[in-house]
Image: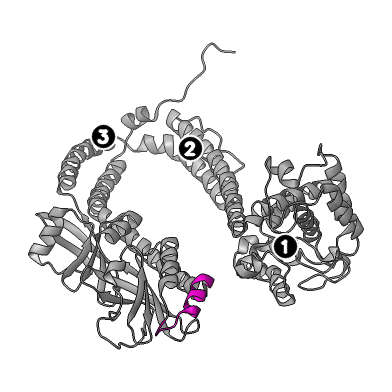
Amino acid sequence: MGLFIRRPPKLVVRTLVATSSAIGLVLVAVFVVLSMDAHNRIAGTTGESLDVAERAFADLDQHRQQETLIKLNALAENRGLGDALARYRPVSGSLDPVEREMDRLAGKLGVDALVLTDGADRILASAGPRRAAWPPDQPMHGTSGASAPRQPEEFIPRPSALFRASGISLTALNPGIGFVYVVTALDDSYAQQLTSLVRTPVTIMRGGDVLASALSATERSALLREGVELPIDGTIDLADEPHAVRRLTQTGPISFYGIESLGLSTHRATRNALQILSIVAIGAVALGALASLWLARALAKPIDQLSQKLRHIAEAHDFSSTVARTGSSQELDAFTDTFNQMVKSLQAAEAQTELAYVGSIKALAAALDARDTYTAGHSERVSTLSVLIGRQLGLEQRQLDILRLGALLHDIGKIGVADRVLQKNGPLTQDEFELIKMHPTLGAHILRQIPFLSDHIPIVELHHERPDGRGYPKGLLGHATPMLARIVHVADAFDAMTTARAYRPAQTTSHAISELWRYAGSQFDSEAVEAFVAAWSAMPVGEGQNVATILAGESATVLPFERGTDPGARAAS
């Protein structure tokens, strides 16, 4: 073995020795392109920011419309408001109960104002921080007897501000009532709120009038003083400084603009940097003219080999393989090592993406559970119990992964079940029970809109099927129901039996297990019950402990059993 290990020469050494005139020409071309690109990037930075703001504003506006519709529907279906309105009589009735309920709803919905009108468009009551702009016995639209709104939303001027209002009819609750409106003030506070969301100063205008703005006092004064007509997309001068302008959206006579300063100091710094870059480029071209032949022979071959290997990895999407060092230069070897490290980082990123995907599903399940105090942690525990059964049955890891997430989402269809049914404390009527029985079908319909959740659909749709064919929604017999769905059925029922509900305490684990054995083969799959009992028996569990204590380390309650007429029908809801 020799005393010295030969190290490849540095790339800069070979470059200084043999840089070709062709490389010089390439550098000149690159310099021109980079110069133009640098200029365009600086000039276009603000434009790109406005592009992002425009897209964000469109998404925000769509979300606002959906949220407003949800709030209006919630008002139309609110039991407290409905009861108060039902008792109100236009001639002699008191509005105090209605006003109290409106105050509560305004705070809960977080709106600027709620306004209640009669059929003649006269304001009966208002609530919220901006209620002063909507005094009683005044016309809602400024003129007495105005017709009901024909648009989803409208703009109504008041002395204090211009308001955006969306209304819904309440005549079904009380024939003496016309509409209830959700009202938002288009003022500086609203403009600041929009600015924080889209990260671009927002200005709200009607024609040439500035209604609200998040610009600085100097910029706003210049805009008002000069009476500038804002373009849909372009630039204007405010306070001796150019600003980029983009109309984010327009609703009727109201326009929302994003106005960003271009920054003159940034342009000066850019020009100075370009001057220095010109000097460097001239020197690089001179060095590049020394020699290209030797550089091509020394570097073209190893670079070509490296490029082919990189192309193979990219086309095959095979991130498990690595690129071997060429040994031609330290820089190429360092580049190869960096690329190999990047591949490892990409693998790690894919793993993190999978974790984020699982976390999102857990958040979705938790959001469903949060609709009722009796559902907290139910989906998470059912998922854990299902995996416990699956491992006892010796399922492969891929099946366990599908089982884990499918169990988390098993009750996702209850998003479509009304709160009055889902949160009812007493026994359900037959009609209400039929509504509950729709949740597997609704859940499957939801997941079919998400391609990467297709493997989990059978669990969500069929976890209430029974071996005796008396389950729902399809009434499948025996093994016609997939094994994963049968496992979730057992875990779901056990968690429901061992957690508290509004009108009875949690059952003991021994009672729940006896119920599972009792109905094994009829309501529950025998193989899944046997696997669960075997796995549960192996755990160091005391008689007084429940599922939440064992799996989560703290007590919790979940949704009660499905309300049936016999223990065999009490599968977990």
Q: In the rendered structure, find residue 287 and report the number of the disc placed on it.
A: 3
Label 1 sits on residue = 573
Give above or below for 12 relative to 483.
Answer: above
Q: Nearer the viewer, residue 525 or 117?
A: 117
Cβ atoms under marks 2 and 3 closer than 8 Å: no
From the viewer's perspective, tell me whether residue 389 is left or right of residue 169. Answer: right
Q: In the rendered structure, find residue 34 and report the number of the disc placed on it.
A: none
CA gap, disc 3 to disc 1? 77 Å
Q: Residue at x 79, y 62 (%)?
A: 571
Give above or below for 205 relative to 337.
Answer: below
Cβ atoms under marks 1 and 2 closer than 8 Å: no
Q: Residues within 10 Å of mark 3 (few under 14, many from 20)?
A: some
Q: Nearer the viewer, residue 120 or 538?
A: 120
The picture quadrant where one finds residue 274 is: top left
Q: In the rendered structure, find residue 302 and report the number of the disc placed on it.
A: 2
- Three-letter residue code for mark 2: Pro
Q: Residue at x 42, y 25 (%)?
A: 9
Q: Which residues make up the magenta segment?
A: 79-92
Instruction: Assign a secondary structure to mark 2.
Output: helix
CA gap, disc 2 to disc 3? 22 Å
